[in-house]
Structure formats: structure tokens, C-alpha cells
Image (cartoon, rainbow, N blue to C red):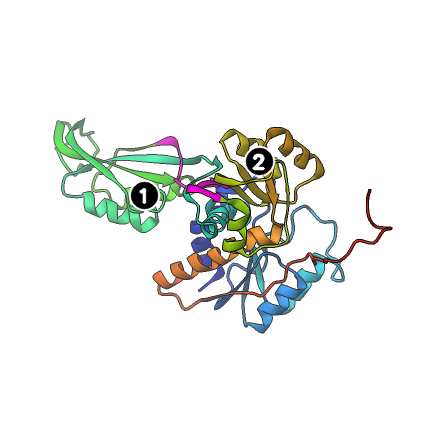
């Protein structure tokens, strides 16, 4: 399969329009025309993960974090990120990232599922911009038009595809002198039973949708229109607010579900709680949002000193489980859903999660008198 076709599949799972403006998800190196036989998945593109991808026989390194976040002045092959790009280019390894667009679709729910949280809702929902197509079709031609449209890829709402609505009515028109009408006679008015057919269109398919209608509609001048709409997909947004059916001891659940022992927390010590908010990765900026929606505990990482103080003022328990630790389950989930989609499409491409190690090393020992802070 060509990389460009694989990218289309990946973007159905993590639509690029959901990425934040400051993000740089997408292709970092490689050609959209190159063939892909195996995908290696990692949180980051590093010399370590490039070497692991090469050893596993991968043609694509699919990462969560983009290799390049900001513009760079040169590509020094001896230092990051130039060294990674050089290493990947040498072995013809493409590098592609799905960052905040995967954050918005699957990252948080993967972690929430590990904690067995139910009734999961986005901590902050993200609106989607679509167009509604309305096309008037003579009775008996609805299936032809729907088949052509759905082949293009329109009609997807959340996890459902090929969605449509139809209602019958009567339409009328006058046939122009130089017309070649499908119904009616030149110079005379005509009326006929028609079906009003509706479906939903992604913004990037507008032009192609119009061409498909012109190519498949029996009328010389088919009547159709696009209406801009905003909608929300259930479960799509930043973070997760979930709850247990009954209150549980929070720290006991961390140990039981995640087997974590090295983490820090701020604010009141949690006892038995029900409502938990989660932002994998760096999500401390959502602290007030978590408080406003009634979370008793907020799990994220990369928490700064002042956010810890703020959590105490709000009376919200803020837990830092680590950037790597909160995002690794989401990488596993990405591998699972991508594998399922490739199998559904009867593709031979294989996915493998690469054994990336977390960047932090934790040391435990006795604090000496000199080191101890009174």
C-alpha cells in the first residue's frame, strides 16, 4: 500500500482538522508515494526508535509526538532532530505523527479504560465543521446517487457511515428552449415526484461531491446545495471526565489498575472518589476546566509548581503520573484500532509497538543530612 493511502486510513482514525493550531502533526520525512509493508509505533521519533523500526523491518515510524514542533534553521545530522531525520532517510523510513488529533479521539479514553471509568465524556468537546448536502433526485434513482456518494466517502457521523435521510415531494420547472431534459418537453413546464436526499459532507470533499453528482445524476441541471453546519462527535474532544459506579479509594485503584508506584500529587489527599478527569501528557492548563465539571481528581503530567498551588486553592486533587506513563496506553490503543482497520480492509500491513523506554529514571534512597531540606 502506498503511504498516501495509508495516511488516509490513519486520518480517518485521527482527523487532521482536530489538531491544535500550534501542532505539527503529519509527515516529517518520507514520500507519500513509497510503499509501506510494516508500521512501527512509538511515542517519539528518536535514534532509539528509528533503530528499533529498522530492526523490525518497518517502512513507517508512526509516532504520537511530532519530530519537529517549531521551524528549524538547519538540519545538522549530528544533533536532534537532524540526526533522527538523517538516520531515517538512510534506511528509507518514513516518519508520521498523530499528536493532538489523536489526543482528541483516542488517547484519553485508553487511559480511562484502564481505570475502569464509566460514563466517559470529553473534558472539553471539540466542534466539527461539516456541510449538509441536499440533492433532489427523481424517484428510482436514489440508490445510484447514494452509491456514488458513499463510494467517495461522504455520510460519516461519528462511528456510523453511509448515513442519509430522504423525503418525497413534488418538484417543478420550465424546460429551456435549448435544453435536453430528462423529464418534460422543451418550452413547457414540467412537474414530477422527487426525493429530497440529504447526507453529511467533510469540508475537503465538497468539490469532488459536486463532480460525483454531475456525473451520476440523470438531470441535465441537477438541483443540489451545501449548508455549513457544526456538530459534535460523541467521545471526541480533549481529555476525559469519567466516573465509577460507586466511590473507590483512589490510590488503591491506581495500584490495582495501573501498578504505579512513582507519581506525585497536590491538593487535598483523595479518599474515596467517583469523578475523575484525565488529560494524558501535558494537561495542567485544563485544571480549572476539571474543577468546573466537578472532578474530584485530575490526572495529567508535567505539572508545574504554581499549578500545584492552584490545585490546593481549588480543593482539587491534582495527580502527576508522568508524560510517558499517561500516553503509553494511548499508543497501544492506536496500534489496536489501526490494526483492526487494516484487517477490515484486508490489508497485509502489520503494526508493531516498539519497545521505547521512558526518558526519566527514578532513584529511591536515603536523603543525606546535607541534601535534606529543613
Disc marking residue 155: 1
Residue appearing at x 58%, y 56% in the figure: 43
Give percent across and percent down for residue 60. 54, 63
The part of the chain drawn in magenta is 227-248
Mark 1 neighbour density, 10 Å: few (under 14) some (14–19) many (20 or more): many
Residue 309: quarter of image: top right
Residue appearing at x 37%, y 63% in the figure: 343
Residue appearing at x 54%, y 67% in the figure: 59
As drawn, 71 above or below 194? below
Give percent across and percent down for residue 314. 60, 29
Q: Distance between the residues labelled 2 and 1?
A: 33 Å
Q: Can you tell which of label 2 and label 1 is closer to the viewer?
A: 2
Which one is nearer the viewer's eye here, 6 or 180? 6
Q: Earlier in the sequence, mark 2 or mark 1?
A: 1
Mark 2 neighbour density, 10 Å: few (under 14) some (14–19) many (20 or more): some
Give percent across and percent down for residue 113. 45, 50
> Magenta stretch containing residue 177, yes or no?
no
Quadrant housing the C terminus: top right
Residue appearing at x 38%, y 31% in the figure: 229
Q: Is residue 371 visible?
A: yes
Disc marking residue 286: 2
Which one is nearer the viewer's eye here, 252 or 145? 252
Dot 1: element: loop
From the image, give the main secondary structure of the stretch colored magenta: strand
As drawn, 43 above or below 210? below
Residue 284: quarter of image: top right
> Magenta stretch containing residue 242, yes or no?
yes
Amino acid at each position: 500500500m502506498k503511504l498516501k493511502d495509508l495516511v488516509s486510513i490513519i486520518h480517518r482514525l485521527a482527523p487532521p482538522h482536530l489538531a491544535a493550531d500550534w501542532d505539527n502533526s503529519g509527515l516529517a520525512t518520507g514520500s507519500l508515494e513509497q510503499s509501506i509493508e510494516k508500521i512501527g509505533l512509538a511515542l517519539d521519533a528518536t535514534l532509539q526508535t528509528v533503530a528499533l523500526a529498522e530492526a523490525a523491518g518497518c517502512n513507517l515510524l508512526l509516532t504520537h509526538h511530532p519530530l519537529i514542533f517549531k521551524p528549524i534553521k538547519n538540519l545538522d545530522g549530528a544533533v536532534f532532530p537532524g540526526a533522527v531525520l538523517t538516520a531515517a532517510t538512510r534506511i528509507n523510513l518514513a516518519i508520521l505523527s498523530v499528536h493532538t488529533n489523536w489526543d482528541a479521539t483516542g488517547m484519553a479514553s485508553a487511559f480511562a479504560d484502564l481505570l475502569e471509568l464509566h460514563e466517559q465524556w470529553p473534558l472539553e468537546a471539540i466542534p466539527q465543521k461539516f456541510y449538509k448536502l441536499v440533492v433532489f433526485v427523481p424517484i428510482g434513482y436514489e440508490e445510484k446517487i447514494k452509491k456514488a456518494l458513499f463510494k467517495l466517502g461522504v455520510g460519516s457521523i461519528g462511528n456510523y457511515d453511509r448515513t442519509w435521510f430522504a423525503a418525497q415531494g413534488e418538484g417543478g420547472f420550465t424546460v429551456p428552449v435549448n435544453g435536453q431534459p430528462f423529464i418534460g418537453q422543451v418550452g413547457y413546464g414540467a412537474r414530477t415526484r422527487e426525493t429530497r436526499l440529504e447526507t453529511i459532507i467533510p469540508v475537503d470533499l465538497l468539490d469532488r461531491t459536486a463532480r460525483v453528482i454531475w456525473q451520476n445524476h440523470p438531470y441535465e441541471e441537477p438541483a443540489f446545495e451545501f449548508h455549513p453546519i457544526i456538530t459534535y462527535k460523541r467521545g471526541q474532544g480533549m481529555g476525559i471526565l469519567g466516573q465509577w459506579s460507586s466511590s473507590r479509594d483512589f490510590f488503591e485503584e491506581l495500584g490495582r489498575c495501573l501498578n504505579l508506584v512513582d507519581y506525585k500529587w497536590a491538593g487535598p489527599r483523595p479518599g474515596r472518589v467517583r469523578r475523575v478527569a484525565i488529560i494524558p501528557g501535558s494537561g495542567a492548563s485544563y485544571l480549572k476546566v476539571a474543577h468546573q465539571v466537578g472532578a474530584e481528581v485530575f490526572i495529567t503530567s508535567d505539572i508545574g509548581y504554581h499549578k500545584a498551588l492552584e490545585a490546593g486553592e481549588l480543593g482539587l486533587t491534582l495527580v502527576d503520573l508522568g508524560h510517558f506513563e499517561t500516553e503509553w496506553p494511548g499508543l497501544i490503543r492506536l496500534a489496536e484500532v489501526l490494526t483492526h482497520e487494516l484487517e477490515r480492509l484486508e490489508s497485509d500491513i502489520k503494526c508493531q509497538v516498539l519497545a521505547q523506554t521512558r526518558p526519566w529514571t527514578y532513584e529511591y534512597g536515603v536523603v543525606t543530612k546535607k541534601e535534606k531540606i529543613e
